[in-house]
Amino acid sequence: MRHRPIATLAAVLTAALTSLAAAQQTAPDSTHLQRDMSRDQRQISADTVKRDKEIAMRDSARTTLNQDQAKTHSETLAIDSTKAQLAREEKASPRDTAAINRDKAKLEQERKQLDQDLDRSQKEKAKVEKMDKQVQKESDAAIDAHHDLNKDREKSSTPKTTEPKSSTSKSTKH
């Protein structure tokens, strides 16, 4: 008779340990989710700060590019004006060779300046395009972190139910 209470006690202890093990398995999941959510929050903050910095730098570069383009446009108009002045002086009679030579030198100087400004403008344009890609990359990273955080929140708000697995099988009698 003594063997029966021990067997019953062993069965009860086994069932209790099984349910305790299942409860312990759910605890690390919630802790893990909390760590994931905290990490995602930090990542979102870092990505947002980095993206905002990249946007500010890109906007500054765009402003410089716009200024370069405006300067290039005004230099083109100045070149056109100098060309018109030179054409009038060459047609004038009597010809003023000193004025013609000054205008040719001025025209040459304006063309050199325009070429330099066009080169600088091309570099600024490439810089802005590179910054646009960087801003897009940072935005994508922030969006991915938001999605991860939302998934973690969904997981943490969905209660997990753990049902003990039954090892008994139905037997059929013939």
Image: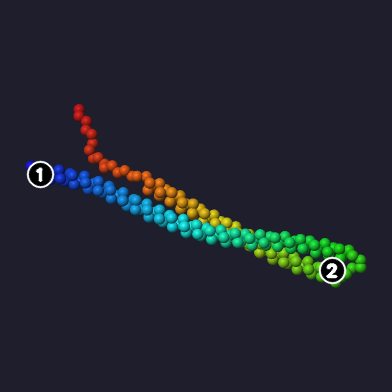
Indicate left or right for 170 with 62 as reference: left
Residue at mark 2: 100
Tell which of 129 and 45 is nearer to you.
45
Amino acid at pointer 2: Ile
Residue at horizontal 60 percent and vertical 61 percent from the top:
60
Residue at horizontal 46 percent and vertical 55 percent from the top:
44
For the C terminus, the image quarter is top left
Q: Earlier in the sequence, mark 1 or mark 2?
A: 1
Q: In which quarter of the image is residue 130?
A: bottom right
Q: Residues within 10 Å of mark 2 (few under 14, many from 20)?
A: some
Q: Position of residue 152 (x, y in %)?
A: 40, 49
Residue at mark 1: 3
Residue 117 seen from this side: yes
Q: At numbered mark 1, what does the secondary structure look like: helix, strand or loop?
A: helix
Indicate left or right for 17 with 2 as reference: right
- Calculate the distance from the C-alpha at mark 1 to the C-alpha at mark 2: 124 Å
Residue at horizontal 50 percent and vertical 59 percent from the top:
49
Q: How crowded is mark 1: few (under 14 residues within 10 Å), some or many (20 or more)?
A: few
Indicate left or right for 130 with 108 as reference: left
Q: At numbered mark 2, what does the secondary structure look like: helix, strand or loop?
A: helix
Q: Where is residue 137 in the image (x, y as percent from the top left)?
A: 52, 55
Q: Position of residue 22 (x, y in %)?
A: 27, 47
- State whether residue 94 is above or below residue 36: below
